Image: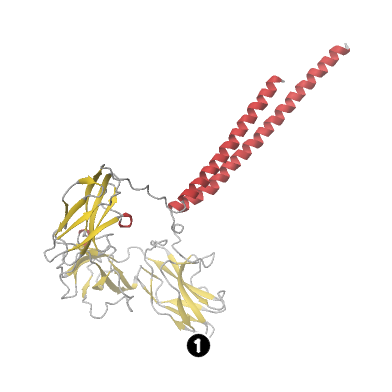
Amino acid sequence: MDAQVSGQWAAQLRSRRRQHGGSRGARLANVLRTWALCALALGLMIGLPGIARAASPRQRPGSCGATQLSASPAVAATHTDGARIALNIARGGAGSKLIAQGMGWPAGAQLTLSLEQYGTVIPNNHDVPLTVAADGTFAAPPLAAPGPTCGFDPQPGTAIQIVGRMATNSQLMASATFTYIASPPALAPAVRDGAIAPDATSLPVTGVGWDAGTLVTLWPAPEWPASAPLDPWQPPAGVPSIQLAADAQGAFTAQVPLLAGTSPRRPGITMLAAASATSARYGTLVTSVPQPFEVQPLVAPVLALDRTGGVAGVTIGVTGDQWWPGDVVQIAYCRGAVALCNVYATQALGTATVNRAGHFSAQVALPANARTGPITVEAYAGSGLLGPYVVARPFQVVAGGAPANPPHAQPPGAAPLLVTVLMALLLGLLMLAGVLVAVWLLARRRRLA
């Protein structure tokens, strides 16, 4: 009897040990799995931000260098200690003239005036320094309501704040609100792609969204002016302009005259047309065509190579016709059979000067270590980024005993980043393998028990 009880007790003890051991094994497996997942997550946390930074080295989307000033938006006509700001208009469109006036400010105080949205300065807009008069007032110089830019895209109903702050005490501030209207005035080229001839005397434009019967002033403007105009709502001195009235639908077509005596213009030059008008709906407003006009050649430039392929180090005869007389043409090549090269990834081969007839010729040699495969030979005048005088032709580098170029170097930081990510992933996989081995050992032990 005692032996039977003792045997039963031993069996129960072994069962409890197996249960306890299995429970411990399950807990250990869970712990190891948790460690593995944590290691894998840590690796991803280390690697992914670096990958994102390498893939997009610019600032975070929408920031564009904007300055965060406060966490909450300013409110229309808010004031502190009696300081106030008033605007000449409360609504309008991009380019509306904003005139801010202040009252109730400390006499002689130094202020800064800024255009903000939700407490952040709108990109490409600078603070305006002001000094308060003895009677506590100020009159700011006119500001243009901002148009679309990086990180800011005003839509109908979008509100911005014109905010004044004390230079010595940013808590003393006041603001006024400006709201964007629907269907603001707009101007656009009346020709496809804005292309005009070198001997053009005017810029064809169309306008929509202007108030019916409004008198509109139009003038040409450079795309990249040397300096900002003193009064952007008026044509600069010496620049030709015209005036016309918008029709009953607020639309018009016009030919904006160009400055006489400047024709023919070199193809590739870009320019804008601007328009200004005043109405109760949008105040005094100026706008310009969103796409610049570009002077195009009457005949497209031609580029020819005296051969379509050759070994590394071969000399290539390059000729061009219908190019702009006097231009210095850069001749370069890039890897691959592409339509146009990236000017920052080309290798220079030589230069040539265009004669009065628009012709040039040059003999250029490929590097002796050029790799076999397709390349693109390109000729360009100017920056080589855009414009009509960028022409490319395909070429095939064939084997001929020439040594190959070394592999393209990885961008800075790419190799260390890749190593970091791979090491992190390897650590996670090793931890996961450890978990699987531990589970297998525990299961085997249970079977043996």
- The residue closer to the viewer here, 142 or 20, is 20
Residue sitting at x 19%, y 52%: 316
> What's under tag 1, amino acid-wise?
Asp
> Compared with residue 217, is residue 387 higher up or lower down, i.e. above or below?
above
Judged left or right of residue 127, residue 244 is: left
Picture quadrant of residue 444: top right
Residue sitting at x 29%, y 63%: 290
Q: Position of residue 182 (x, y in %)?
A: 35, 63
Q: Position of residue 326 (x, y in %)?
A: 17, 67
Q: Residue furthest right?
A: 2
* Quarter of the figure that contains the C terminus: top right
Judged left or right of residue 428, residue 14 is: right
Which SS class for mark 1?
loop
How would you rate the neighbour count of disc 1 (Cα within 10 Å): few for under 14, some for 14-19, many for 20 or more? few
Query: How many numbered marks appear?
Result: 1
- The residue closer to the viewer here, 54 or 365, is 365
Any part of residue 104 in sight: no
Picture quadrant of residue 15: top right
Residue to which mark 1 is pinned: 135
> Compared with residue 18, is residue 8 higher up or lower down, i.e. above or below?
above
Q: Residue furthest front?
A: 401
Judged left or right of residue 409, residue 332 is: left
Q: Residue furthest left?
A: 357
* Quarter of the figure that contains the N terminus: top right
Q: Position of residue 172 (x, y in %)?
A: 56, 76
Residue sitting at x 28%, y 53%: 341
